Image: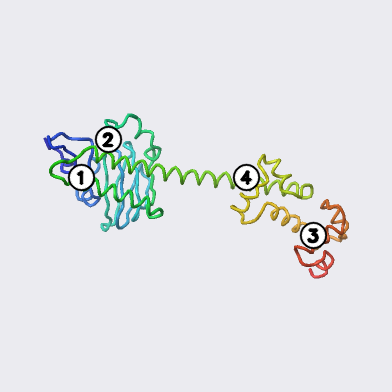
């Protein structure tokens, strides 16, 4: 029997059985007011929020998150929440308890294992049109199914909700992997640059540094191109050239003495190297600067 302010948005089958699932438009939530929204949070629902228009601020565990069109958000069942929004904001909120899905799938810990429910998570679907279209289609399919007076299929609603969760998980996992790879790449390049700083007089070739970094020369080169838009060899050469110019302009060392200090096999090789990249001989560069 319907005896709750939220029952108008709850899922019932044809026999009047109530399921642990509610579907609400954001403006319906706002119309319920702060007290009702607080009461709703005490029902231990997981939430999927999808913003279709406008913008606003959502507070989860006292932290503010700015939401905009295309954002899909995941809220755990334990988080304190409230809205502070522009009234133009539109979208949907799916409330469900994990039992709604565990009655349908074999893994009864499926929802709890979704990392994005452990903290408030926002992902913008406009960044990936394919994903956005799939989520939009799944939400509209849920809405269509809920509006059916007869032959409402609860399992179809579960399937659409699972689709939203699974494809979102895949995209968020992909983004996290990209972020992790970028962090690891940054660390590798920083280690490489530090090695160059310490050993540019000693090591002249990427393979020597790659050995110390325990990666292949090809991998080191590809990461440098990706992160610095330069090859590993370019970074080594640039540091040697900087030191060469510094010694030419701040000391009275001859080109031969500089070649020796920088560990070139002879002064003529150093001169050819310098002229190739600076377009001046060491002596010409010194006179000009």
Q: Say left or right for 4 vs 60.
A: left
Return the mark for residue 145.
1
Q: Which residue is mark 3?
A: 273
**Is label 4 or label 1 in front?**
1
Badge 3 crowding class, 10 Å Cα cut-off, few under 14, some 14 to 19, many 20 or more, is some
Sooner in the amino-acid sequence: mark 4 or mark 3: 4
Disc 1 is placed on an element classified as helix
Do the CB atoms of the residues marked 4 and 1 lie less than 8 Å apart? no
Question: Vertically, is 57 above or below 184?
Answer: below
Q: How far apart are labels 2 and 4 at the CA level? A: 44 Å
* Label ID, residue 97: 2
Q: Viewer-proximal residue, 99 or 33?
A: 99
Where is residue 226 shown, x and y percent of the image?
A: 59, 52
Marks 3, 1: nearer the viewer: 1
- Find residue 203 and report its horizontal and vertical position in percent: 77, 47
> Which residue sits at x=16%, y=45%?
148
Residue at numbered disc 4: 188
Viewport quadrant of the N terminus: top left
Labels 4 and 1: the sequence-earlier one:
1
Among the two numbered marks 2 and 4 on one chain, the one whose residue lies closer to the N terminus: 2
Mark 2 or 3: in front is 3
- 141 sits left or right of 177 in the view: left
Please rate how many residues cluster around mark 1, counting C-alpha atoms within 10 Å: few if below 14, some from 14 to 19, many from 20.
Answer: some
SS type, badge 2: loop
Marks 1 and 2 sit apart, C-alpha to C-alpha, by 19 Å
């Amino acid at each position: 029997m319907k005896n709750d302010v939220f029952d108008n948005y709850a899922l019932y089958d044809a026999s009047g059985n109530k399921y642990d699932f509610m579907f609400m438009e954001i403006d319906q939530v706002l119309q319920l007011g702060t007290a009702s929204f607080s009461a709703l949070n005490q029902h231990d629902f997981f939430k999927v929020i999808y913003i279709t228009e406008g913008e606003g601020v959502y507070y989860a565990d006292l932290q503010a998150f700015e939401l905009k069109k295309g954002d899909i958000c995941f809220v755990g069942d334990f988080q304190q929440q409230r809205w502070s929004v522009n009234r133009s904001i539109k979208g949907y909120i799916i409330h469900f308890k994990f039992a709604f899905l565990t009655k349908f799938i074999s893994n009864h810990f499926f929802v709890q294992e979704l990392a994005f429910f452990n903290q408030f998570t926002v992902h913008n679907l406009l960044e990936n049109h394919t994903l956005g279209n799939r989520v939009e289609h799944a939400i509209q399919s849920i809405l269509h199914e809920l509006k059916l007076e007869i032959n409402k299929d609860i399992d179809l609603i579960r399937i659409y909700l699972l689709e939203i969760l699974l494809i979102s998980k895949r995209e968020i996992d992909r983004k996290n992997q990209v972020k992790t790879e970028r962090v690891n790449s940054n660390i590798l390049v920083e280690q490489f640059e530090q090695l160059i700083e310490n050993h540019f007089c000693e090591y002249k070739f990427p393979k020597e540094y790659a050995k110390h970094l325990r990666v292949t020369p090809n991998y080191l080169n590809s990461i440098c191109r990706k992160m610095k838009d330069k090859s590993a060899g370019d970074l080594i050469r640039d540091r040697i050239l900087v030191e060469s110019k510094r010694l030419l302009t701040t000391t009275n060392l001859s080109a031969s003495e500089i070649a020796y200090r920088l560990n070139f096999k002879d002064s003529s090789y150093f001169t050819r190297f310098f002229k190739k990249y600076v377009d001046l001989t060491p002596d010409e560069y010194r006179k000009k600067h």
